[in-house]
Amino acid sequence: SQQGEEDPQALSIQEGENATMNCSYKTSINNLQWYRQNSGRGLVHLILIRSNEREKHSGRLRVTLDTSKKSSSLLITASRAADTASYFCATDTGFGNEKLTFGTGTRLTIIP
Amino acid sequence: DSGVTQTPKHLITATGQRVTLRCSPRSGDLSVYWYQQSLDQGLQFLIQYYNGEERAKGNILERFSAQQFPDLHSELNLSSLELGDSALYFCASSQGLFYEQYFGPGTRLTVT
């Protein structure tokens, strides 16, 4: 079963615009991670945010976490054609249940 | 290049057959994870090993088994294959528990 659900399922924006994707999850988490996947290829880790953190940045990426709402968002600023990919959130619930559960993903298309 | 290698890249086999997928983790990584990705089920966690021991199990069928060897490489064995087992199988590795995961390029399995 999926722990995380990304919203929207698909997003198309013009190059240079910002893209925001959201992830909602059902149970309390230990960590939340975001990954990118280009079509048919392996996933690439983007950011890991711990449950006691609220925001994290990495280059053009900004991730926020709201544990009270059980949600996270990924913001990509100044999008580029190379950002076209599927984006997944993934959560773990801590010791005793360390498996990473992935959401359904957001398909992002950047229009040049 | 994530540093995780998987062989073979492609595998075509018939129903009822048995196959073995192989994964070599990044140098120094102790944890290995297996995932199945299909169009209808999304990315599903199968099993995790940490330093040779099974650590977490997901929705892995009884027909599937895996192990992690002393040199930390891992194998996923799929037996009595069915058409529905056709999917991309990814291996990932990480330093340990609750770290970011590095994914291999995947093995595309087609069962005919």
Image (cartoon, coloured by chain):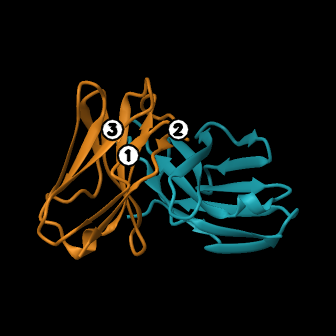
Chain colours: A cyan, B orange
Q: Which marked residue is nearer to the observer: mark 2 or mark 1?
A: 1
Q: Disc 2 and disc 3: Cα gap in Å?
A: 18 Å
The answer to whether residue A98 is left or right of residue B11 is: right
Amino acid type indicated by mark 1: Gln
Residue nearest the viewer, comparing B83 with B58: B83
Q: Is residue B104 above or below residue B14?
A: above
Q: Which residue is mark 3?
A: A96
Query: Residue A11: image x %, image y %?
Result: 70, 73
For disc 2, the neighbor class at 10 Å (few under 14, some 14 to 19, many from 20) is many
Earlier sequence position, callout 2 versus callout 1: 1
Query: Residue A39: image x %, image y %?
Result: 56, 64
The chain carrying label 2 is B
For disc 1, the neighbor class at 10 Å (few under 14, some 14 to 19, many from 20) is many
Q: Is residue A109 above or below residue A91?
A: below
Q: Disc 2 and disc 1: Cα gap in Å?
A: 18 Å
Task: Tell me which corner region of the image, top left, top right, bottom left or bottom right, holds residue A99.
Answer: top left
The chain carrying label 3 is A
* Residue at left offset 26%, top offset 68%: B85
Q: Which residue is mark 2?
A: B100
* Residue at left offset 75%, top offset 48%: A61
